[in-house]
Amino acid sequence: MKKLLKILLSLILILFLGLFIAYMLMNENLPEGKDGPEAEALAQKMLLATNKAAWDTTHIIRFSFRGEHQHLWDKKNHLAQTEWEAYRTVYDVNTAKGKAWENGIEITDPGQADEIIRTAWGFFLNDSYWLNPVAKIYDKGVTRKSLTLEDGSKGLLVTHGDGGITPGDSYLWILNEKGLPKAWKMWVNIIPLGGLETSWEDWTQLSTGAMVARKHQLEIGGLGIPIGDLKAAGTWAELGEENPFTVLD
């Protein structure tokens, strides 16, 4: 038993050291960038490539995140329906107030309902950001800086100074020649490894004309982040679905 315990402790120590060495080798400090005309030109090029104007007129969109959370987003009226496991919620995305159901039965206890809705709201903030973060690069508190990448091309460093649930996060956008993102590097609160790179692939044009990426692949472990069940419209009639938010009236 003592010998087995020593072996287990040795394996744990080796694993810890391996992770520490990997962290030291792969962790990147947040790079310095420069604000000004060059950064703004890159930002505008990226907005044009993803058709931000069409995104602004995309009033309703349905999507799923990693097959785990299903969202129906009324962008025009700032409402969302989020479903996962046994739960369904409808709520105002600005106030995180609404209604919740478990196994089709409405949760009438205010405290329990509020907790479920807050969980759904957290999912929504994260998942909708992955759906189209390009549309948020001119939000209040966001800074944009340009810098030169290793291959000599220009990258756009975007930092969210406030807002959302993780203020202070930074993303270095790596663009193709047309301004469409190929990947980004992340410096975010929830990931201890700075500069983790994720691809932006399978760009798809919605029925409204906006462009979104349906596939993201992390450079470590090959973890995929798929965006599925995409469907967009300007009205409920175009979407072909009933408006679920009438219960909030």
Image (cartoon, helix red, strand yellow):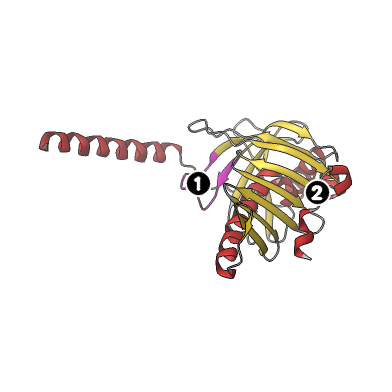
| Amino acid type, callout 2 | Ile
* Residue pointed to by mark 1: 29
Would you place residue 173 above or below residue 56 in this image?
A: above
Residue at the (66%, 41%) spot, across then down: 64
Residue nearer the viewer, 211 or 206: 206
Reading the image, the residue beneath label 2 is 60
Q: Nearer the viewer, residue 162 or 225?
A: 225
Residue at screen point 53% across, 33% down: 223
10 Å neighbourhood of mark 2: few (<14), some, or many (≥20)?
many
Q: Nearer the viewer, residue 156 or 62?
A: 62
Percent of width and height locating residue 89:
66, 56
Residue drawn at the location 56% of the way across and 69% of the way down = 111
Q: Which residues are magenta?
A: 185-196
Instruction: Give the structural element (helix, strand or loop) at label 1.
Output: loop
Which mark is in front, 2 or 1? 2
Q: Position of residue 187 (x, y in %)?
A: 54, 48
Q: Quadrant of residue 77?
A: bottom right
User: Going 75% across and 58% down the picture, which residue do you hit?
Assistant: 79
At numbered mark 2, what does the secondary structure look like: helix, strand or loop?
Answer: strand
- Quadrant of the rendering where the N terminus is positioned: top left
Image check: 44 left or right of 109?
right
Magenta segment, prevailing SS (helix, strand or loop): loop
Q: Residues within 10 Å of mark 1 (few under 14, many from 20)?
A: few
Where the C terminus falls, by quadrant? Answer: bottom right
The answer to whether residue 95 is left or right of residue 249 is left
Say which amino acid is labelled 1: Asn
